[in-house]
Image (cartoon, grey):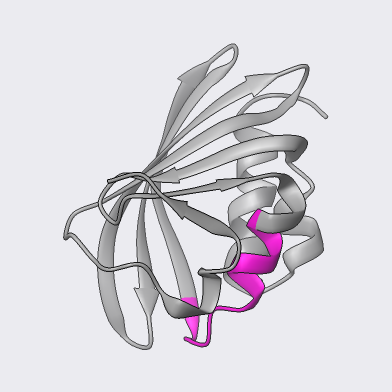
Amino acid sequence: MRTGSAALDRHWAASDAGDFDAEHAIYRDDALLEYPRSGERIRGRHNIQASRAAQPNTKRVTVRRILGAGDLWVTEFILDYDGRPSFTVSVMEFRDGRVARETHYFADPFEPGPSRAQWGERTG
């Protein structure tokens, strides 16, 4: 997989469309996803995908901009759950053409969602 904005364009479009397989093709099998505002960490592409598929809300993604080079890319986007927008920044670190680590920064703190509790561990 090619690292860069084209791969991220496909990722975010699949996320917005609810295409979980295409959305998560960008991740390494051993990827790590962190949500610092809720104190969660999810390990492994399979668990990341399962946790997002279990989310009961209707999700929409509006990308504002994608910046980066090489193995480090940042996406600023609005994540809308059931009509409630949340300004979000995703930092993705690539290794061998796939995401090895992603950190999602949300503008507002939130409690971990019960729909993904079985896949995450508390970090704070």
Quadrant including the N terminus: top right
| Residue 13 falls in image quadrant | bottom right
Side of 100 relative to 61 (left or right) = right
- The structure residue drawn at horizontal position 38% and vertical position 65%, both measured from the top left corner, is 79
Numbered circles on residues, count: 0
- The structure residue drawn at horizontal position 18% and vertical position 54%, both measured from the top left corner, is 107
Side of 103 relative to 47 (left or right) = left
What is the residue that sits farthest to the left in this orientation? 108
- Assess whether residue 53 is covered by the magenta stretch: yes
Side of 25 relative to 72 (left or right) = right
* Above or below 95: residue 108: below
Q: Nearer the viewer, residue 6 or 103?
A: 103
Q: Nearer the viewer, residue 92 or 6?
A: 92
- Assess whether residue 18 is covered by the magenta stretch: no
- The structure residue drawn at horizontal position 48% and vertical position 52%, both measured from the top left corner, is 121
* Above or below 23: residue 20: below
Residue 4: percent from left, percent from top? 63, 26
- The structure residue drawn at horizontal position 69% and vertical position 67%, both measured from the top left corner, is 50
Q: Nearer the viewer, residue 49 or 94?
A: 49
Residue 34: percent from left, percent from top? 44, 43
Residue 40: percent from left, percent from top? 40, 51
Residue 71: percent from left, percent from top? 59, 15
Q: Nearer the viewer, residue 2 or 51?
A: 51
Q: Which residues are magenta?
A: 48-59
| Residue 105 falls in image quadrant | top left
| Residue 75 falls in image quadrant | top left
